[in-house]
């Protein structure tokens, strides 16, 4: 219970703290997400290069995966298991020091175009070698539990 309270307190502070995002930041994240969606739909090979070297992902019902060289194979595995398209919709971006926090919605579809999953995500982005890279990436389904 304490974890949820702390999470909602932090999320509330982030949502109410700050100003509207400068267009350059927003467009950088939208562009990076477009690259992610294209790379995924083209076989999800080399997805790790979109993540910071010390990135972590927090997939639902699974262990944390650390490092872009381990994250790449995770996405390739998802593609090989039948997810052929990932659609990302940015809802909000907030500058937080030298990082950006993005919240949004996702949809995952199979080869037939049918939705396999949809939900929400939060990404912390950081600049690495002059490019915005995914640094912390967590998502969870909005579908009812089975």
Image (cartoon, rainbow, N blue to C red):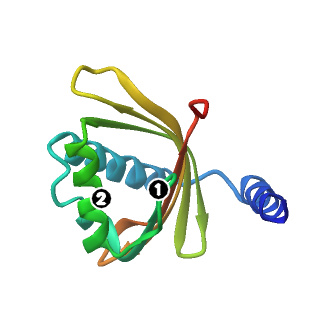
In the rendering, at what x and y percent does residue 144 appear? 61, 30
> Which residue occupies the foreground of this view, 96 or 6?
6
> Who is closer to the viewer here, 34 or 65?
65
Judge from the rendering whether residue 118 lies leftward or rightward of residue 66; answer left or right.
right
Vertical arrangement, residue 84 with respect to residue 33, above or below: above
In the image, which disc is placed on residue 69? none
Task: Give SS at disc 1.
Answer: loop
The residue depicted at 47 percent of the width and 65 percent of the height is 63
Name the residue carrying label 1. Answer: 59
Residue, disc 2: 74
Q: Find out whether the residues at labels 2 and 1 contact each other: C-beta distance under 8 Å.
A: yes
Measuring 41% from the left and 53% from the top, which residue is drawn there?
A: 29
Residue 15 vs 34, above or below: the answer is: below
Which comes before the other along the chain, label 2 or label 1?
Answer: 1
Left or right of 32, for residue 80: left
Residue lying at the far front of the rendered structure = 146
Residue 142 appears at what percent x and percent y? 58, 34
């Amino acid at each position: 219970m304490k974890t949820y309270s702390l999470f909602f307190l932090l999320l509330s502070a982030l949502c109410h703290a700050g100003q509207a995002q400068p267009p350059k930041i927003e467009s950088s994240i939208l562009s990076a997400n477009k690259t992610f969606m294209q790379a995924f739909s083209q076989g999800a090979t080399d997805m790790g290069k979109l993540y910071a070297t010390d990135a972590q992902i927090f997939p639902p019902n699974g262990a944390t995966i650390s490092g872009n060289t381990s994250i790449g194979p995770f996405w390739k595995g998802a593609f090989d298991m039948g997810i052929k398209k990932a659609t990302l919709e940015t809802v909000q971006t907030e500058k937080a020091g030298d990082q950006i926090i993005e919240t949004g919605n996702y949809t995952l579809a199979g080869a037939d175009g049918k939705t396999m999953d949809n939900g929400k995500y939060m990404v912390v982005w950081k600049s690495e070698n002059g490019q915005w890279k995914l640094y912390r990436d967590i998502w969870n389904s909005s579908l009812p539990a089975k």
